[in-house]
Every structure is written in structure tokens, then in C-alpha cells.
Amino acid sequence: MFSANATPTKIMNLTAFGPGGKAKVHYHRDFETAIYGISGRIGLYHGAQLEDYCLIEPGTFCFIPPGVPHIAFNLSDSEPATAISSRNDAAEQENVALVPELEGLRDKDIEEKKRR
């Protein structure tokens, strides 16, 4: 039974990238993220130095453990891309931390993947 006074412990979002869209490098403090592709193609680098890569297409699932830096980007410069993101933290926006020291680290790789 759902109580109007209950505090949710999980949250789901529609993550939408316009053509050529790219997030900033960030991580989520103390909670995991699950991403499920809906439309388009989204690339996602993750890891301490963004060394791991996941291609998110319709029907594809990617898991990011708590505290792991990542950057997601639309592989198309002409079409939008969407995914469902699910996290086990209702205060997820307050628990996002940017990682400016990793910004730009994979820019060359991102451009190469977009050309494929």
C-alpha cells in the first residue's frame, strides 16, 4: 500500500539528449544508476579515468555503481536520443558531483565514435 507520507527511495527519469548533446562528467554520491535505452544511440564512458565504454541503444541496459565518474553523450548530431535512468536515491539531484578534472578527457574518443 502506498502512503502519501512515504518518502520514495527510488526514482526514474527520462534522460533526453538533443542532437549532439553531452552531459558534464559527474558521479552520483552513494547510489547506483541503471540506464535503459529508449531511442537513438547514447555513448557512455565511465570509470575512474573514464576508461570503460557502454553503447546504449533501444533495449540496451547499462549499470553505473555508486561514486563512479561518467559522461553520457548523443552519438548523433542530427537525431535526439532518450533513455530511462533509475536511481536508488530520491534526492538524486542533490547528490550529483561534477568532476571538472576529467572534463575533456574523452573528447577525441567521443568525436571518433560519432563518425562511426
Image (tube, grey):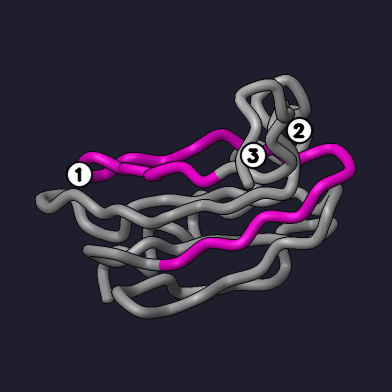
Residue at image point 76% right, 40% down? 28
**Observer able to see residue 100:** no
The secondary element bearing badge 3 is classed as: loop
* Percent coordinates x, y for residue 36 in the rendering: 45, 67
Kind of residue at badge 3? Val
Residue closest to the eye, 46 or 28: 28
Q: Name the secondary structure under disc 1.
A: loop
The question of residue 22 being in magenta is answered with: yes
Residue 1 place in picture, x, y as percent: 63, 47
Residue type at numbered disc 2: Val
* Number of the label disc, if any, that sits on residue 25: 3
For the record, the magenta segment spans 12-36
How far apart marks 2 and 3 lie (CA) works out to: 5 Å
The mark nearer the N terminus, 2 or 1, is: 1
107 part of magenta stretch: no
104 sits left or right of 21 in the view: right
| Contact between labelled residues 1 and 2, with CB atoms less than 8 Å apart | no
| Residue lying furthest left | 78
What mark, if any, has residue 99 been given in the picture?
Answer: 2
Q: Which mark is residue 19?
A: 1
**Amino acid residing under circle 1:** Pro
Task: Between residue 76 and residue 12, name the one nearer to us.
Answer: 12
Query: What is the distance, in whole Å, between disc 2 and disc 1 at their CAs?
Result: 23 Å
Q: Earlier in the sequence, mark 2 or mark 3?
A: 3
Q: Is residue 104 left or right of residue 59?
A: right
> Quadrant of residue 98 in the image?
top right
- At a point 32% along the width and 43% down the height, the residue shown is 16
